[in-house]
Image (cartoon, helix red, strand yellow):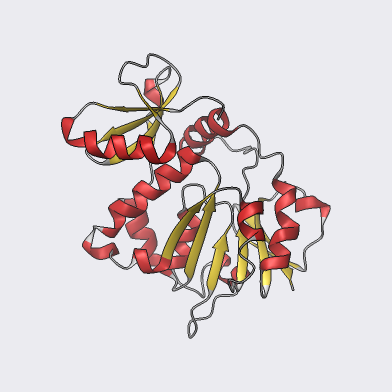
Amino acid sequence: MPNPFTLQFTCEEDAALAISLSEKWGFNLNASAQSGLVLDLHQGRLSLKDINEPKMGMVSVDFDSDALRYRQQQVSIKKEAIAKAVGLKGDTQSHVLDGTAGLGRDAFVLACLGAKVTLFERSPVVAALLENGLARAASAPELSWISDHMSLHAGQSTELMSVASDAEFDAVYLDPMFPHKKKSALVKKEMRLFKQLLGSDEDADSLLEPALALAKHRVVVKRPDYAPFMADKKPSMQIKSKKHRFDVYLK
């Protein structure tokens, strides 16, 4: 982001947190922004919105939402394609690196299944949303475990992976942004905002080699069914779900 991203807040109770966020992430505090993408802080909850399209609503990270509570109750290593792809086993705790964390939903599923997940996110805006969601979740009684299972590091994944060689990651998980054909309301809202914010993941192919160098056992790439292989490299095997496929590169 060439210019400081705008952060707004209206409640005085959010002032201290807003100042802390602006200092940490380099955001510009501006309550009078009239157009474009902005971060909105309200009662401790950080969200991304487009002032020009108020009907679109806002995007935030909420691990304590009804949808993710239900998801947490339903997850099972035997039933989840992502668990099979990453190689999770019920009797051991795997350490997974999510190199393209985004809103953290897949990482949350892996954490619910018992994995320890380290998240890398290069966008300061998305990282701030994710950090805010993790902090709010940690204060919820039913999610107090989350701090022990999910940790966030902001920065370019290729650079962070190059200095993480001493860490033992059983698997590296990659889910770079890819154009969606389906037009569901949720995908449309999030993808439109993220496309405006981030553009295209044109350098996604550069993640594969450092991921293969770092992972102990495998690299997993999540793709839409119609997408080509990452870096045109054929995986060792594929595991398919209803909406996606997981390309698995075994070491």
User: Can residue 248 be seen here?
Assistant: no
Instruction: Locate the C terminus and report the quarter of the image it occupies.
Output: bottom right
Q: Position of residue 79 (x, y in %)?
A: 51, 70
Q: Percent position (x, y) of residue 204?
A: 70, 46
Quadrant location of residue 8?
top left
Residue 106 placed where, x, y %? Answer: 50, 57
- Coordinates of residue 218 in the picture (x, y in percent): 68, 70
Q: Which residue is found at the position 61% from the left and 61% from the top? A: 173
Quadrant for the N terminus, please: top right
Q: Is residue 133 above or below residue 209?
A: above
Residue 39 visible at all: yes
Callout count: 0
In this view, which residue lies farthest toward the bottom?
91
Q: Quick one: 55 or 110, which is closer to the camera? A: 110
Give 192 or 198, whichever is nearer the viewer. Answer: 198
Q: Is residue 202 above or below residue 97?
A: above
Q: Residue at x 37, y 55 (%)?
A: 68
Residue drawn at (42%, 15%) of the image: 35
Seen in the image, is 157 located left or right of residue 204? left
Q: Is residue 25 left or right of residue 180?
A: left
Give whichever of 80, 130 is nearer the camera: 130
Residue at image location 50% in from the left, 31% down from the top = 193
Left/right placement of residue 45 relative to residue 99 reads left
Establish if 157 lies above or below 49: below
